[in-house]
Image: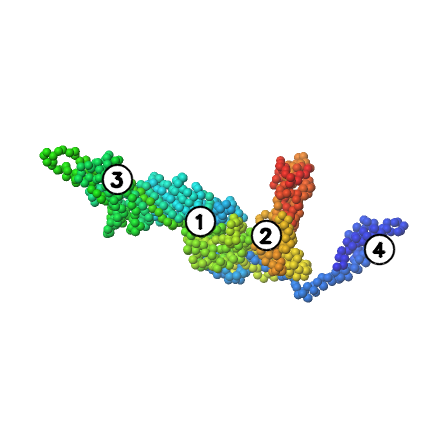
Amino acid sequence: MLDDRPLDRRLTDLRAFCAKIPFDGPGGGTWAEVFFGMPEESAALGAELPDRLWGGRTRSPLHGFTCAALGMLDVPQSLLNALPGRHRDLYYRSFLGLAERPARADRAIVSFRIAETLSELELKAGLALDAGYDEAGSPRRYLLERDLIASRARLTDLRWSRRLADGSVRTATAIEERSRLLWPTGGIDVALDTVLELPASSRRTISSAILASAGGRRLIEVSFREDVGANVISAEVSCAGGWVKIPRREGAATTTKLVLVLGGNAPPIEANAALGPLPMLRLSRSDGKEVPEVDLLEFSVDGVTGIALWSDETSLNPQRPGYAFGARPSKGSACEIIVPELIGKTGFDVKAMLVPRWTDLPQVPFASWYEGYPDAPRVGDNFGASVSVIVAGRDPIPLGTGLGLFAVDDPAPPHGDQLRFDLPQSLPAGAGKGSLLSSYPWHLRLELERDFLHATYDRDRLTVRPVGEPMRAPLNPPYTPRWSGLNLSYHCRQNAPDQRIITPFGETIVEEEFRDAIYVGFVDAKPGSQLTVYWSISTRRMLGLRWEYLSETDGWQDLTAYLCDETDGLTRSGVWSASLPDDATTNGGLMPSGRLWLRAVPSSSDRGSDRSIATHIAAIVVNADFCRLEDVETIGPGHFATPLPPRSIARPSDPVVGVERVEQPFPSEGGRPAEDGATFAVRVAARLRHRGRCVTAWDAQQLLMEEFPEVRAVRAVRRLGQGRVESRRSRLLVVPTNAASVTGDRERPGLSAGQLNAMRTFLAARSSAWLELELVQPRYRSVPVSARIGFRAGMNVHRGYRYVKEALLSAFVPWRADVGRPLPIGKALEPFEVRDAILAVEGVESVHDLLLTGDGLPDPAAEDEVIVLDVSALTPGVAGAQRTSQETRLG
């Protein structure tokens, strides 16, 4: 291109050149004075040049000659300078067939709310939506990109659970409509917002009929499948009012066994209608780990209550004195015992024990007491009894015979003994009420097997002794079995009892491995219907989550076959659509009822990380999809200067029956104005250089900058981390614009994993298959600065420090406010630069004890590292009291 300077600039440059050539004449001077006069006249000439040149008014013939000569060159100069552009157009347009890019339509997310009378409404692709007018008054219409089946579904819950590195579990309920936990303005940091998280108590409930007990001293023994440690398990039992805490028996448990004791004054253990049909034992673990599976449940009661006794058709109170077998017991006399608590244990292994508390026993052995009786018991003999079960319409079922009523330890006097027996598991089940024998399916009978010799005693008393027969001592009266009370105890056991695992938000009977998960709940989402959701996601890592749904079988089932997921497992924003399976349920025990539940769980490769589900969810929009601008060529360029603001699309262009409301929650994206000639020339020149192929780092930079407007800069790096070098692969450092950053921190902009993956895929399609291409992001290193600053007299110190902070951020972190400023990647932070920047602030007179600390400064920054100056420590009176060998001190 020829000289393209304007005429006044060429005159100025010519005068400067002539001023360097001396004029050999009478007056001396330079040739500039000859052609242009004195310097002040030259300046005036330049200001009036256009009028003088074309108006024919000049100060001298030399002036006229100079202006005319320069003016004559304007036309050939313009013609010659147009030649390169015409040549480029000939090559670019005529030969290569290229042209400026047309305007690209932007697209926006819209959601629909349908009438309450409809369960679903099919909206066809191409549905026109009104978006107002552009700056020229042209109507803007957006068309729905694809068919959308809108439903009445509504998001009500968002929760998550995750396991920490120490094995404990944390849960969080971020959104719950019933508790009025609504969506926060800034979105939700899943697995990152620890304020929402609470420790999850690991629990397991055991439902068993053997736990039913009206009273007495109760002992519960729980045997676990694996070790649980000491003093980490607490227990509760169900009662009519809810739950009762039951203490451990100290020193009785092992690492696999827990022994619990409930006193006689505690309330009955019984079923609670709100919990289930059976009594329950709830085990909780304080260390956050899972309560292991229970292999064996044992239950013992000492002092069973609610017993009813009958003897000789006379009702007895088991806790008061009475004659067990009547006032004159004989062989076959019996005591009928009703134990409702044992009737409820039918079908279990029960070992029972009766312990009568006998009174008025002889103070000598029975052999001595009954001395003189014809059938007197011999030394060591006992009075036996049998225990049997009486079932209506059946023969008695013997449980034990020859059971001694007393402990006979000659020469000691007799005392009470225990009567032990086992209950068969085949007894009829049922329930009874009251104290009548006929009201119960079965009862126990305690029957005498030996006479207490009351009839013998009576006959002896009535017998007349012959005259002359020597007198003998009278017989001792026979013992009449009388007790002060009857104690019944039993022990029963159940192998592998029914148990449910208390999950973070529900319970299940299925033993499954704990999974980190994100849970979402929907109301009015019907099985078999279509659910379409837009996820606004920001995450720095690839999640690769897999989706599951809660089924009628009370378990989580894979949703992949029913799913179309454009979010890549919640890695990036996109539309998520699923045909809900027919067996999906709203009443699964694993989660709160009334909602249809879905969950996202990490793949097997991501297990074990406490950040496997970490992501930022800005919004979840139901019944949403993309719409695209129509007739983009008729829209003015001002429309593309900024995205279409939210809520600009509010209704269909033509009324649609069943659509109550249309919402646009986010600004539009992806729009681009028509390309102008200058941009076209630059783009094509770059394209001719890289030819659409990624061979060099420059190629990758240009390709990414052209395709992805969110990229601010691309830089090739070789050293990462601690100076590590690998020449076999190509690494590109990608820096996003502030608007495209997902970090929420303008000082540390970063791209999402989905964005990086899209860029990687884009470059891989344009590069060699042998090229190992890696896209990375800058590493940010925070460097705190502290100093003692002196200000001029009368200046407010606090205001002065604020000015200093603003100046330092503007000088060393300029990209936080100015989107056009580049990041100083790989540039070290020099202390003298910081000092000079502080001294340049108005009002600052001195800087003392300037300290830059942290991470080995002043070591140079790595190739992929950005130093971020931290000015939070710059406050009056703080000057960095501690200095290490890695600190730099100035002043």
Kindly identify the amino acid type of the residue bearing the numbered disc 4.
Leu
Q: Residue at x 25, y 44 (%)?
A: 402
Question: Distance from label 3 to label 1 (Cα)?
Answer: 53 Å
Does dot 3 land on a helix, a strand or a loop? Answer: strand
Residue 689 x/y as whole percent: 68, 60
Task: State the quadrant of the N terminus.
Answer: bottom right
Numbered label attached to residue 406: 3
Kindly identify the amino acid type of the residue bearing the numbered disc 1.
Thr
Mark closest to the chain's N terminus, 3 or 1 = 3
Does dot 2 land on a helix, a strand or a loop? Answer: loop
Numbered label attached to residue 751: 2
Mark closest to the chain's N terminus, 4 or 3 = 4
Classify mark 2: residues with Cα within 10 Å, few (<14), some (14-19) or many (20+).
Answer: many
Question: In screen coordinates, is 865 left or right of 655?
Answer: right
Q: Determine whether 596 is above or below 220 in the image.
A: below
Identify the residue under disc 1.
503
Identify the residue under disc 4.
62
Of marks 2 and 3, the one in the foreground: 3
Residue 319 x/y as whole percent: 27, 39
Let me know if residue 228 appears in the view.
yes
Q: Residue at x 58, y 56 (%)?
A: 757
Numbered label attached to residue 4: none
Residue in the foreground of this view, choosing between 816 and 759: 759
Q: Are marks 1 and 4 in contact (CB under 8 Å)?
A: no
